[in-house]
């Protein structure tokens, strides 16, 4: 089974083609321009390098967030467009989970293995806040330890300290244990290991917090047409 994985939750957009048996066939990333102009170019590049056409893929997987609102909307719309045109299912996974995945697997593969080591993925939410979650790799699967949340940076150390265990923080914010970003390869691997639920019709990004427009105009944008 071959899956195209896409993540655009951060300023670095990423795409990869992953074979369930052979592993990563091709992967690439681009800077912030990839969200707005070149995401399809990036996807076309990895498909060509992997030697597969969209219709030859078995599924599309998207990192649904949290992250950049603009990046998430463009990523989800692009993934839906490809899945619809190719007649393939669309699977969605957490971008924070995709960020935690490589480190959690690394702990599990260590010799001796670090049993159920806690990994705290962190992404910059702007406005002086952070998105964070907690994950463990158990019996070959990434398992959430509580809900993903929005934090003030000063509150992150307390969140990372769980049951007298100091979790390893990973992400794109200063002062973390390890640097990293969610990748298309991790998105595809997580989707393959997950429930494989098709969200082509109702799938939407996970924002966690309200948008700027919702905060500024809780009763609706002035002058906008009202729903009947």
Image: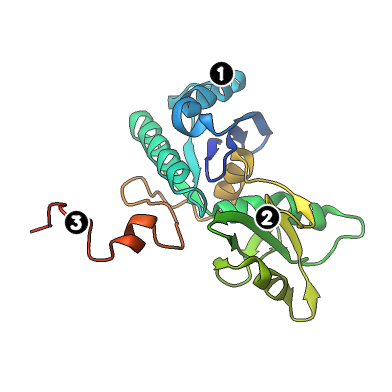
Quick one: label 3 or label 1, which is nearer the N terminus?
1
Horizontal and vertical percent position of residue 164: 79, 80
Q: How is the image coloured?
A: rainbow
On residue 222, the disc is 3
Q: Is residue 7 visible?
A: yes
**Marks 2 & 1, CB-CB < 8 Å contact:** no
**Marks 2 & 3, CB-CB < 8 Å contact:** no
What residue sits 47% from the left and 38% below the top?
59
Quick one: label 2 or label 1, which is nearer the N terminus?
1
Label 1 Cα neighbours within 10 Å, binned few <14 / some 14-19 / many ≥20? some
- Above or below residue 5? Residue 204 is below
Horizontal and vertical percent position of residue 155: 65, 73
Q: Which residue is mark 1?
A: 48
What residue sits 55% from the left and 67% below the top?
149
- CA gap between label 2 and label 1 equals 28 Å
- Above or below residue 83? Residue 110 is below
Question: Nearest the camera: 228 or 6?
Answer: 228
Question: Nearest the camera: 23 or 41?
Answer: 41
Question: Nearest the camera: 197 or 130?
Answer: 130
- Above or below residue 185? Residue 29 is above
**Nearer the viewer's eye, disc 2 or disc 3?**
3
Which quadrant is home to the N terminus? top right
Which quadrant is home to the C terminus? bottom left
Q: Which residue is mark 2?
A: 100
What residue sits 45% from the left and 39% below the top?
75
**Nearer the viewer's eye, disc 2 or disc 1?**
2
């Amino acid at each position: 089974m071959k899956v195209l994985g896409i993540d655009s939750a951060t300023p670095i957009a990423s795409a990869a083609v992953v074979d369930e048996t052979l592993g990563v066939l091709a992967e690439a990333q681009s800077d912030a321009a990839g969200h707005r102009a070149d995401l399809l170019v990036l996807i076309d590049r990895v498909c060509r390098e992997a030697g597969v056409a969209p219709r030859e893929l078995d599924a599309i997987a998207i990192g649904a967030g949290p992250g950049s609102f603009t990046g998430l909307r463009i990523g989800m719309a692009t993934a839906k467009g490809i899945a619809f045109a190719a007649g393939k299912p669309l699977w969605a996974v957490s971008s924070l989970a995709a960020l935690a995945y490589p480190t959690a697997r690394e702990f599990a593969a260590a010799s001796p293995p670090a049993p159920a080591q806690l990994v705290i993925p962190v992404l910059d939410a702007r406005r002086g806040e952070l998105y964070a979650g907690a994950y463990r790799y158990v019996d070959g699967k990434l398992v959430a330890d509580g809900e993903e949340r929005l934090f003030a940076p000063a509150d992150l150390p307390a969140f990372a300290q769980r049951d007298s265990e100091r979790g390893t923080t990973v992400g794109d914010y200063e002062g973390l244990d390890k640097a990293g970003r969610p990748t298309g390869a991790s998105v595809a691997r997580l989707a393959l290991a997950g429930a494989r639920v098709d969200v082509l019709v109702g799938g939407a990004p996970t924002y966690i917090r309200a948008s700027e427009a919702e905060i500024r105009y809780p009763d609706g944008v002035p002058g906008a047409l009202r729903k009947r």
